[in-house]
Amino acid sequence: MQDMNNTLARTTITLPQTLLRTAKIIAVHQNKALSLIISEALEEKLMPNKRNLPKRNPMMLLGKYSLGIKSRLRRKDLYAEHIKHKMSY
């Protein structure tokens, strides 16, 4: 299931103990690494029809969805607002 072209990344997640225990048991029964079990579960959840999805150009979505922002955002304005908020504590 895992795409060999993807590089692996380490991460830390917090899971309920019962879920982790179940994942470990499944890993032992299937003779697989725990990380592979979690990776496969995430892939099934996040990309259930990965092979059936048409390839879309993400640039085609530009302008189709509104973020609810009326004015144009500028980096310097956002930074100034961030500094103002940070200094108020």
Image: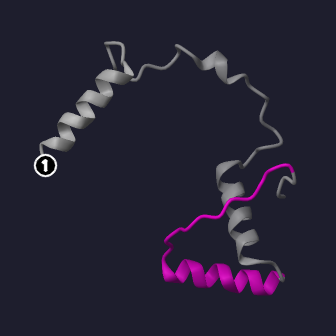
Taking depth in this image into account, of 7 and 33 the one nearest to the observer is 7
Tell me the colour scheme of the image.
one colour
Q: Nearer the viewer, residue 19 or 6?
A: 6
Q: Locate the N terminus by quadrant.
A: bottom right
- Residue range in magenta is 5-30
Q: Is residue 33 magenta?
A: no
Q: Residue furthest left?
A: 88
The residue carrying mark 1 is 89
Q: Residue 18: x percent and y percent?
A: 53, 83
Pointer 1 local density, CA inside 10 Å: few below 14, some 14–19, many at least 20: few
Query: What percent of the width, then of the height, locates residue 12?
Result: 55, 68
Looking at the rendered structure, the kind of residue marked 1 is Tyr
Q: Is residue 44 above or below residue 71?
A: below
Write down the quadrant of residue 84 in the picture.
Answer: top left
Task: Tell me what residue is drawn at x 50 percent, y 82 percent.
Answer: 17
The vertical placement of 84 against 71, above or below, is below
Looking at the image, which residue is at 52% across and 13% down?
63
Q: Picture coordinates of residue 10 (x, y %)?
A: 65, 64
Q: Is 51 displayed left or right of 24 in the figure?
A: right
